[in-house]
Amino acid sequence: MKELFAATLILALLLGCSALAVTVFADRALFVSPPDAVAEGFVREVVTRRWDRARAYLASPDSMPRTKLEALRSRLGSADNVDARIITRNDSRAIVEVRAGSRVLRVGVVWEGGWRVEEVYATPVYGGIAGWVALKL
Amino acid sequence: MDWQELGLTAARGVLVYVVMLVVIRVLGKRTIGNFSAFDLLVALMLGEVVDEIIYGDVSIAQGLVAILVVAAAKYATAWITYASPAASRLLEGRPNELVRHGELQAKAMRAELINESEVMASLRLQGVSDVREVKSAVMEVDGVVSVIREEWAEPLQKRDLGTRS
Amino acid sequence: MELWRIAVRAAIAYAYLLALTRASGKSTISQATPFDFVVSLILGDLIDDALWAEVPLAKFGVAAASIVFCDLVVKLAAFRWPAFRRLVSGDPRLVLRDGIEDRGQLRREQLNEADLEHLLHEKGIDREQWSDVHLGMLELDHELSVILTPGAKPATRAMKEQLR
């Protein structure tokens, strides 16, 4: 019986540390999935056409109905490799650049107790300060 | 901290544990000695599916189907190898005699891709220091080398001493 | 993803699993039956998603804990109620008695006569020596334990006296 108590204690310890890290120390990337992992996961689900699982990554599931996801998928094509890189982030928002095969796009994520996908942008058409075109897809 | 998600994870963990307990209990026969290499592969396969279920990456229905198919396939092959010696030879391989009456069998060693020093090492692991003591050393189906000693090399047995035992 | 985060997560996950399995006592990390082995595999596999942060550490913690808890409960129940233990782990089976095999018991383990020969070979016992075997038990971990007839047992030093 004491083993049950000991095991519960260990679990409670981990959960406690996790909760502490997120609430007190504003951890956004260690105990929880960081923005790039979330964005990458989202894009992977879209590329493999798993719409329901992709929607699970969204901040509000209605913001991207299936048609929108399908359109995104047709833009992306199939991809063997999905890689993500954080461009910028603060404590509540982040922009992640995701490379899917040969296509690149940017994913905006927002913190809601866990990073969630908010918007998807096309990448800059022109590099440099002058030609930044952010098109909401 | 998404308590609901954590609760679901715990529930899936329990479900999966019970399912695996039943599956392994039913499947767990016909493993000779410790796990053979293929049993290990099957265990790994099942383990992978189990983890996907616990983390909620696949639906429970999908996961259970995967587990049941792998389990059923394993069960079917187990029955076939039990019932048919020919199938057993095909699916599990056959034992190969590496040493006979103290002499290394080159053909068998070549078939098993095992060289002389490896054979000697296996013999030593069985407590045999002199290859002449060996009546028959066989590379068994699960990769273990079993040793049968010559009559005269056997340890002394109680009845050899001719006393009441 | 920064490498140091992966490293820290790996360390935390490792320490957590270690603490969890130690806290639950030796019975859960044993390899007494094939099922115990599978449980260990499952636990190790869970770490995978935690390292790449595809899953928050809290979720990993709960997942691992749920498996360990189930195992603990089952082990405790098996310890307390032998009938339950038999249900969960099975029984050792007597497959060879005084040189004669028990086909029924063998069939229940899906083993045929050739398999029994292999098992005995691994113990260094030839077909002709089967009559030396008093009891051949297929244990829970599928090893065959062999008890020889009294005459066939190795001689002991105590018997040296009788030689004089």
Image (cartoon, coloured by chain):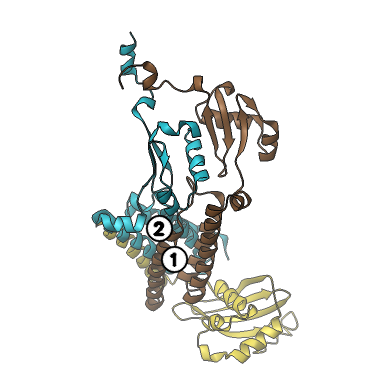
Kind of element beneath mark 1: helix
**First in sequence: mark 1 or mark 2?**
2
**B123 or C69: nearer the viewer:** B123
Q: CA distance from mark 1 to mark 2?
A: 10 Å
Which residue is under mark 2? C16
Quadrant location of the N terminus of chain C? bottom right
- The picture's colour for chain C is cyan
**Marks 1/2 same chain:** yes
Could you say where residue C31 lies in the image, as x and y percent from the top left? 41, 49
The residue type indicated by label 1 comes to Phe
Chain shown in yellow: A
Q: Chain for mark 1?
A: C
**A66 or B98: nearer the viewer:** B98
Q: Residues within 10 Å of mark 1 (few under 14, many from 20)?
A: many
User: Relative to C12, is C78 on the left or the right?
Assistant: left
Could you say where residue B102 lies in the image, as x and y percent from the top left? 61, 24
Q: Residues within 10 Å of mark 2 (few under 14, many from 20)?
A: many
In the image, residue C45 sits, relative to residue B121, either above or below, namely below
Quadrant location of the C terminus of chain C? top left
Residue placed furthest toward the right? A126
**B1 or A130: nearer the viewer:** B1
